[in-house]
Image: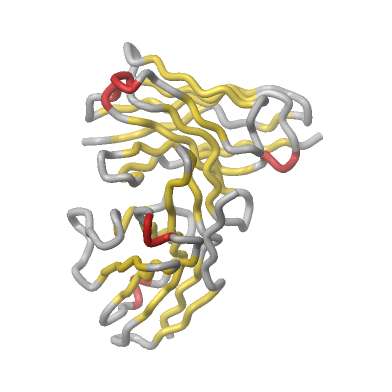
Amino acid sequence: SYELTQPPSVSVSPGQTASITCSGDKLGDKYASWYQQKPGQSPVLVIYEDSKRPSGIPERFSGSNSGNTATLTISGTQAVDEADYYCQAWDSGTVVFGGGTKLTVL
Amino acid sequence: EVQLLESGGDLVQPGGSLRLSCAASGFTFSSYAMNWVRQGPGKGLEWVSGISDSGSGGSTYYADSVKGRFTLSRDNSKNTLYLQMNSLRAEDTAVYYCAKRDNINAFDIWGQGTMVTVSS
């Protein structure tokens, strides 16, 4: 079965750039999406189709996808961005999520 | 306002059954694929099942972990998604989220979740 691999944790200082990776076999041939989840809340879509932002998502969130790796980039990271982030892709009609990355802003 | 409201979560014994519901509002329910995603205590997101929009035939898809035990259906007249869960196991314990798949290959709307606990 298809798998997506994320680092368990990423740390970043306020105002700096955070990058969270998501690896999977030929992931660049699929669309990758990213979700933000804060404690006790439902997930929120922050990036879809590799690099597009839904309305209401700040411009500091961006994405890319090539080869075997998709990347979520948060520029000028703020304290409110501290959360768990999950990548997601489709494979043969089913949905695959990465294991999640806890972003700490310190 | 686009909204998804799950219900039906409960404490159930191993081997038991439960039916979850997801009531949709604020959009044309029949035109969109719908899915269930679960999250075990302290764990990540796990896709459970999905059903295509009515125009695509309402085909259903399941994760290997629930195939043969869970059944997904939709009632477009009631704008409601159902997940029938049989032969429940301890590892099915999780918050179950209903999620709408937009025409953007992603889940753009999520419900608040309903808790299922499988324990004796």
| Vertical position of residue B35 compared to residue A11: above or below | above
Question: Residue B44 at x, y = what percent?
Answer: 56, 56
Q: How is the image coloured?
A: secondary structure
Say how many tags the image has: 0
At horizontal 28% and vertical 39% (from top left) the residue drawn is B102
Question: Residue A63 at x, y = what percent?
Answer: 30, 67
At horizontal 53% and vertical 73% (from top left) the residue drawn is A7
**Left or right: B46 as drawn, with respect to A41:** right
Seen as rendered, the residue at the extreme right is B120
At horizontal 27% and vertical 69% (from top left) the residue drawn is A61
**Residue A48: quarter of image:** bottom left
| Vertical position of residue A44 compared to residue B20: above or below | below
Question: Residue B7 at x, y = what percent?
Answer: 49, 29
* A28 and B86: which is toward the camera: A28
Query: Which of the image's four quarters has the C terminus of chain A?
Result: bottom left
At horizontal 37% and vertical 56% (from top left) the residue drawn is A29
* A28 and A10: which is toward the camera: A28
Question: Residue B67 at x, y = what percent?
Answer: 63, 30
